[in-house]
Every structure is written in structure tokens, then in C-alpha cells.
Image (cartoon, grey):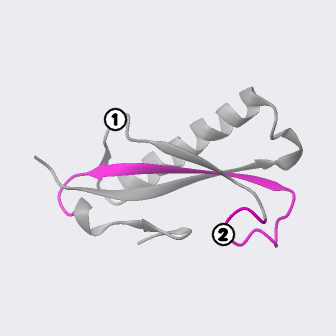
């Protein structure tokens, strides 16, 4: 069995469209693709079906959004697979 770690992927959109489910779904797909690319660049795979999504809003999170208050942020957390994956952990807004 391969060890797993975690990694974030991100997508940024227009906060005025937060209630548009198809728009948010597109941002989720973009965040997952960003996570896939980040994992691949480090030589890891992603455990299928492991993705979890969070919509981040200014004032609702510890992530600093004051510099982009009108931005809707979608974060996708995935489990990594592959040798050494257990040493990579998504923490705060960064991938460790």
C-alpha cells in the first residue's frame, strides 16, 4: 500500500457569482486540475475520489483575503500517492 499525503489546488473567481452553482462547479474543476498539476510536478499521483472542496470568503476563514476582497476562492484538497507522498501535507494556505 502506498503512503499518502495531502496537497491543495486553487481556483479564483468573481464573488458576485457565488450563488451561480454552474460557475462554482467550474471553479471546483479548475481547482482540482490545479491540484493534479501541482501533484504531477512533484512526481505524485492523486487518490481517485479523495478531493474535498472549500469555498473561502473574507471574514469566514484564517486565509488572508483582504488584498482581494471581491474574489471567490475555491480550495481543493487531495490525497497524494507515490513514494515520499507522506512527507507532503497541505497546511494553512500552502503546500508543505
Q: Position of residue 81 (x, y in %)?
A: 25, 50
Q: What stretch is highlighted in magenta?
A: 59-84
Which of the 4 image quarters holds residue 47?
top left
Q: Position of residue 67 (x, y in %)?
A: 82, 72
Looking at the image, which residue is at 77% across and 47% down?
13
Looking at the image, which residue is at 74% across and 29% down?
21
Residue 67 is a magenta residue: yes
* Residue with the mark numbered 1: 48
Location of the C terminus by quadrant is bottom left
Label 1 crowd (10 A; few <14 / some 14-19 / many >=20): few
Which of the 4 image quarters holds residue 86?
bottom left
* Residue with the mark numbered 2: 63
Looking at the image, which residue is at 51% across and 42% down?
32
Q: Depth check: give the residue in front, 42 or 85.
A: 85
Q: Where is residue 68 in the image (x, y as percent from the top left)?
A: 82, 65
Total marks shown come to 2
Q: Depth check: give the residue in front, 42 or 86.
A: 86
Question: What's the distance in space between the residues labelled 2 and 1, CA to CA?
Answer: 27 Å
Viewer-nearest of labels 2 and 1?
2
Q: In the image, is 61 to the left or to the right of 94?
A: right
> From what the image shows, is residue 13 above or below residue 83?
above
Q: Is mark 1 on a helix, strand or loop?
A: loop
Amino acid at each position: 500500500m502506498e503512503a499518502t499525503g495531502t496537497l491543495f489546488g486553487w481556483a479564483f473567481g468573481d464573488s458576485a457569482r457565488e450563488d451561480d452553482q454552474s460557475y462554482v462547479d467550474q471553479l471546483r474543476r479548475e481547482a482540482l486540475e490545479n491540484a493534479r498539476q501541482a501533484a504531477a510536478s512533484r512526481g505524485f499521483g492523486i487518490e481517485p475520489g479523495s478531493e474535498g472542496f472549500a469555498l473561502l470568503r473574507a471574514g469566514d476563514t484564517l486565509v488572508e483575503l483582504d488584498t482581494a476582497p471581491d474574489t471567490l476562492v475555491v480550495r481543493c484538497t487531495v490525497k497524494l500517492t507515490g513514494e515520499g507522498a507522506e512527507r507532503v501535507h497541505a497546511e494553512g494556505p500552502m503546500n508543505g
